Amino acid sequence: MKRTVRVLWAEDKVSKFKTFSKTLDNYLGEHEMEAAYTHAVDGNALYRHLAGASFDVMIADIVMPHWGGIDAVRDLSQRYPGLPMLVVSAKTQEPEFLLELKNLVRDGRLVSFHSAEPREEWCAAVVRAVSYRPPTILHLSDIHFGRFHGIPGGLSIERLLNPILAKITEGGPIDLVIISGDLCSVAHEEEFESARVFVANLLFGLKLAPNRLVIVPGNHDIDRSERLERRFSSFVRFLAEVYRDSPEVTTHRFPGLFDGGSRMWRTHGCKADEVVSLSVFDEFRTVVVGLNSVIADEAAWDESRISAAQLMRVTELLGGLSDRQHRYDRIAVFHHHLIESPTFRRDGEPGRLIKNQGFVLNHLIANGFKLVLHGHTHYCMGYEYRPFVVDNETLAGVPIYVFGTGTLSGSEREPAQSFFHFSILKLNADDGVTVDSANIQAYRLMDSSFEWRALPTFRVDWPRG
């Protein structure tokens, strides 16, 4: 059975719309799709149609009466985030339009723009825009640049990691990188500089822009020699450097880390509750929320908590998503672990858990999160949490899956534990529409050979509906 693609097409010349739509029909048919068209005869008609219906893709000409295509995309991309928009026109290469089209693509408001001929090029772009490919995620944590960095002298983490990542990406690209804290040892500037260089090299090797990276702080990433209100300042400066080449996403992703709506990072000081991020990846229909589980007080060096203020802020940010984005899969990331896990270290280290774990889990499940990624524990561990809540049908039996990737580089060695881990998480959508499982593949660096060994792959399936 062919999938129906709902296409909103703004083209003032009816004859051209009929010709182009027939071409697209033939192309979609080759990909087991068919189109249901809504024809907008000018720019204003786009607004009328969008106000009363939902679409899978919008196509616009540039020059039209009553609001041109470029102006429409600039405005509608803010009103309807997540709706793929393309420009198809004979005028895309004209200097008065070309620069603005490139800027719209750079800012993520326009998927792509194409000349009317050859037609196959923009037909292929439409198929890509409406096709869903769940993301493959590289999950790193606890790198510990500085005195707790565990890579022996003479070897760099890049030198050890790059060959195995090059081999992994032969089977398909890494789409997102998530680092769940502890990039540093004691949050000195030179440690953050080492982390920045590492991140830049990693993204370059994976051919990813900085906006494909999500980072949260760990308890080693705050400067405890600073005043309480400035302990996250070095981490914020680090973020500013990492995302310097992606200014279009920073204020949206970190709403609490900018002075009053300006584009200036709050490097002079911020509260722990303000280090919250919301990353929306329309291409992969995925939302990643970064939370701060670090307590800045000196007396609570190794303790953790995710405050009610943060969780309320997350609910507010999720409420601001478009109707389309509300249906995206949701992943939460923070540094500390939620539940006592069987370990080789005493009793599961209950003192290191997130203190208000029940409240956090309740909030994440109630807000539709399927997956939690964390660090802190220096070994790979995953589990399913499925509450049995008698008086709450919304939460009863709804599972959430929690996975800690282990440390990429830790200097503390215990004979019963193995260090130097990273993980690849491949989300799957067997029906082509909704993510219903994940394959988790962890890798461990062998001390004797300094080669990475793939650990057994685990498949996590979650209920449909």
Image (spheres, helix red, strand yellow):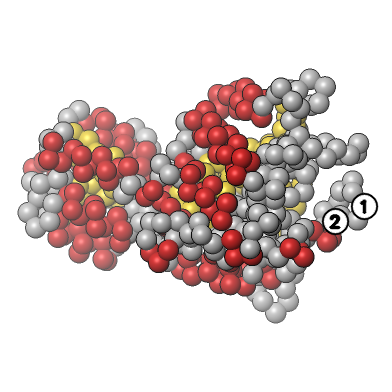
Q: Are marks 1 and 2 in contact (CB under 8 Å)?
A: yes
Q: Residue at x 21, y 31 (%)?
A: 119
Given the image, on which type of amino acid does mark 1 rest?
A: Arg
- Crowding at mark 2 (Cα within 10 Å: few <14, some 14-19, many 20+): some
- Say which residue label 2 marks: 349
Which SS class for mark 1?
Answer: loop
The C terminus lies in which quarter of the figure? bottom right
Q: Is residue 64 visible?
A: yes
- Crowding at mark 1 (Cα within 10 Å: few <14, some 14-19, many 20+): few
Q: Residue at x 12, y 56 (%)?
A: 67
Give above or below for 416 relative to 359.
above
Q: Residue at x 63, y 37 (%)?
A: 424
Provide residue 18's location: percent of width, then percent of height: 14, 43
Give above or below for 178 relative to 43.
above
Q: Residue at x 22, y 35 (%)?
A: 114
- Rounded to the nearest angstrom, the CA distance separating label 1 from label 2 is 7 Å
Give above or below for 333 relative to 23.
below
- Say which residue label 1 marks: 346
Q: Quadrant of residue 103?
A: top left
Q: Is residue 174 visible?
A: no
Question: Which numbered dot is residue 327?
Answer: none
Q: Is residue 427 left or right of residue 106?
A: right
Q: Quadrant of residue 45?
A: bottom left
Provide residue 429's location: percent of width, then percent of height: 54, 45
* Pick the front one: 185 or 381: 185
The N terminus lies in which quarter of the figure? top left
Given the image, on which type of amino acid does mark 2 rest?
A: Glu
Provide residue 88's location: percent of width, then percent of height: 20, 40
